[in-house]
């Protein structure tokens, strides 16, 4: 099998956006004993993640993150088809570089 993934990231002072799109193929080598067919599957997926600094606990290191994704596996044997959709969120601690204001 093989997988391809395209990532796009956008960083602004107010948020970080990460977009991913993927395609993959998986092929079996043996004939399935019940379906009398060799498995082949196409995979598709989209993921969008957003990270927003909050200033929580008087620290700029704390961020809110939200992720939404949709994935699909399309098989030539209908029994193996699958779909996934999810939305997740939470708090994320990302240490920021300290600004150095000293003169050398």
Image (spheres, grey):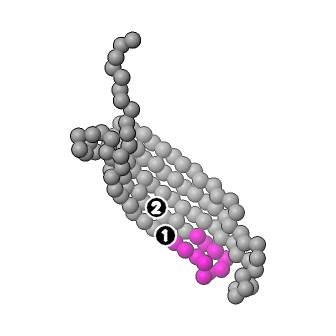
Label 1 crowd (10 A; few <14 / some 14-19 / many >=20): few
Q: Which residue position is annotated with label 2?
A: 69
Residue 31 at least partly seen: yes
> Residue 4, how many percent across, how many down?
63, 55
Left or right: 64 with respect to 70?
left
Q: Secondary structure at mark 2?
A: strand
Q: Which mark is residue 8?
A: none
Side of 61 where 19 appears, left or right: right
Residue wearing tag 1: 84
Place of residue 7 in the rendered image (x, y in percent of width and height, measured from the top left): 54, 49
Is 9 drawn above or below residue 66 in the view shown? above
How many badges with numbers are in the image? 2
Residue range of the region highlighted in magenta in the rendering:
73-84
Taking 72 as reference, is 38 above or below it?
A: below
- Dot 2, crowdedness within 10 Å: few (<14), some or many (≥20)? some
Q: Quadrant of the C terminus?
A: top left
Dot 1: what SS? strand
Q: Residue at x 70, y 86 (%)?
A: 35
Indicate left or right for 31 with 46 as reference. Answer: right
| CA distance for labels 1 and 2 | 8 Å
Residue at the image point whose x is 68% and y is 59% from the top: 2
In the image, 32 versus 15, the foreground residue is 32
Q: Is residue 83 magenta?
A: yes
Q: Residue at x 33, y 47 (%)?
A: 63
Residue at 52%, 65% in the rendered image: 71
Residue sitting at the far top: 104
CB under 8 Å between callouts 1 and 2? yes
Q: Quadrant of the N terminus?
A: bottom right
What x and y, as percent, mark residue 32? Answer: 72, 82
Q: Position of residue 65 (x, y in %)?
A: 36, 52
72 falls in the magenta region: no
Nearer to me, 29 or 98: 98
């Amino acid at each position: 099998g093989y997988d391809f993934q395209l990532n796009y990231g956008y960083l602004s002072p107010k948020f970080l956006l990460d977009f991913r799109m993927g395609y993959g193929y998986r092929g079996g080598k043996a004939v399935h004993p019940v379906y009398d067919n060799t498995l082949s599957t196409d995979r598709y997926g989209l993921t969008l993640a957003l990270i927003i600094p909050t200033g929580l606990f008087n620290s700029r290191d704390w961020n809110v993150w939200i992720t939404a994704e949709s994935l699909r596996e399309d098989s030539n044997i209908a029994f193996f088809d699958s779909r996934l959709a999810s939305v997740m969120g939470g708090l994320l601690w990302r240490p920021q570089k300290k600004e150095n204001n000293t003169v050398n």
